[in-house]
Image (tube, rainbow, N blue to C red):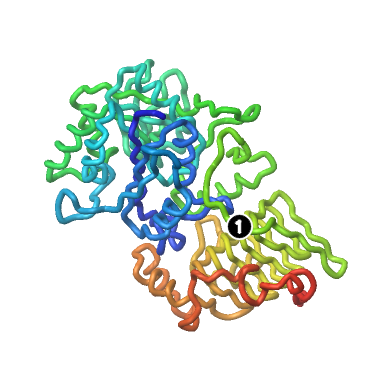
Amino acid sequence: MKPTLVMIMAGGRGSRLAPLTCHRAKPAVPIGGRYRIIDFVLSNFVNAGYHRIYVLTQYMASSLIRHLSRHWHLNAPGLFVEVVPAQMRRGDQWYQGTADSVFQNLNLIDDYSPDHIAVFGGDHVYVMDVEQMENRHLEANADLTIAAVPVPIEEATEFGVIRIDAAGRVLGFQEKPARPAEIPGRPGWALASMGNYFFRREVLQNRLVADSRDPKSAHDFGRNVIPGMLKDGLRIFTYDFSTNEVRNAGPGQKPYWRDVGTLDSFFDVNMDMRKPLPPVDMYNRQWKIRSARRDFPPARFVGKGGRVCEVIDSMVCEGSIITAAHLENVMAGYDCFVHAGSEIRDSVLLSGCNVGAGARLAKVMLDKNCSVEPGTVIGEDPDLDAARFPFVTETGIYVFPKGTHIPQKGPIELSVDMVEALHQDPATRGIFEASLDSFIVAERDRHSHESVGPRFDRYGRLAELTGVIEEAP
């Protein structure tokens, strides 16, 4: 067991992922059919032998806490993945920034007094042997080591860019610069911060205390703490994530990291995972991506009435039933039901969804427990879709909040709890208020938490699943 203490910052709102985040924290967003975003960073640490992990939560944390408390247990004395909600230990305020979230929990560091602290974000999707980064930190005798990834210079304007010398020592930091600094000896490429750090414990404690006393500070690592350390000449180095090698990785498997910052990037990560040769390897048995263990039956594929099931370059998770339908480039979560004659392309279905017979969907994201009426068409008439569906990404993907019912025609039906969430969230309030004619509110007894997949009462008997399924219109 590694002596280093790990602190995962998992309190982020993730407003650019709304409406997926209007009722849950960004690290709790389901991804890849059966995972949550936070499962990736936790798996990286546990697989690398780090077993003292605190997860710092704040915004909309109930589903995240439920997931961690039910499914992330380390069964040995002194080993833990422990949830730490914001507690106002340092005053009458919630976390004011990334640095403040750690500052308010310095008591946890004092309990163990390790030599080094890992401070990582909980909202990226990546596979990484974290020990290799700490080895770099120790070999450089660094006060701080920052994980960084090379990106093309034209993409670097969206990241915090690190300027380094030939030895990898940090000389400067630029937040989303118009003219990013290039990597020495590598023209056309810049070094983007991943927001993941290894600190020397004494340095971290001293800098956080000093930052807390600065009334002008935003109490953020990237904007305040790290620039202050650079100004004072502390030893800050980078770790090049592109050199990371995960145990038992397949031939030619390159390091994978994505900042799931927008709905389009979230969609792209799901599409990456279902590719025939996925760039993110979820099949490495020596580097498992751990998550919830569900007692669902295997996915079931049923032919009917001369029709066959066609599933092309897609992933379908446990407990789901696909009946004489066509799926192409689809990520379908657990406990989904796709009925006869349906066609789904280039889409993401989170768990518990039901797609009626003969529906045709393209470039759609359904949050959990959404239902689609038989014969519904989405993705073929842009003008009609734009008039009916309020939530659409920059690339034209239509997103439906949790528990939405989508009829063939007319306004969508939102579950009553999601109406409140969409109205309260600043990221969705404007779209919600401008689209009042685009939806109706469901009956009070229908809640977004209710699955409409095979577990739903109407489809709970095997005879109905295999023989008495409605025909396509």
Residue at the limit of the structure toward the right, as seen here: 306
Looking at the rendered image, the quarter that the C terminus falls into is bottom right
- Is residue 343 positioned above or below 167 on the image? below
Residue 219 as seen in the image, left or right of residue 463: left
Nearer to me, 40 or 348: 40
Q: Position of residue 282 (x, y in %)?
A: 60, 41
Looking at the rendered image, the quarter that the N terminus falls into is top left
Q: Where is residue 268 in the image (x, y as percent from the top left)?
A: 56, 48
Q: Position of residue 112 (x, y in %)?
A: 27, 34
Nearer to me, 111 or 472: 111
| Quadrant of residue 376 within the rendered picture | bottom right
The answer to whether residue 25 is seen in the rendering is yes
| Quadrant of residue 280 within the rendered picture | top right
Q: Position of residue 369 (x, y in %)?
A: 55, 67
Tell me what residue is drawn at x 36 percent, y 46 percent.
82
Tell me what residue is drawn at x 79 percent, y 60 percent.
309
Tell me what residue is drawn at x 69 percent, y 66 percent.
338
Indicate the secondary structure of the residue bearing disc 1. Answer: loop
- Is residue 175 positioned above or below 191 on the image? below
Residue 229 as seen in the image, left or right of residue 176: left
Residue at the limit of the structure toward the front, as seen here: 77
The answer to whether residue 178 is seen in the rendering is no
- Amino acid type, callout 1: Asp
Nearer to me, 224 or 3: 3
Residue indicated by mark 1? 295
Tell me what residue is drawn at x 39 percent, y 21 percent.
136
How dense is the environment of label 1, judged by Cα within 10 Å: few (below 14), some, or many (20 and up)?
few
| Quadrant of residue 21 within the rendered picture | bottom left
Total labels drawn: 1
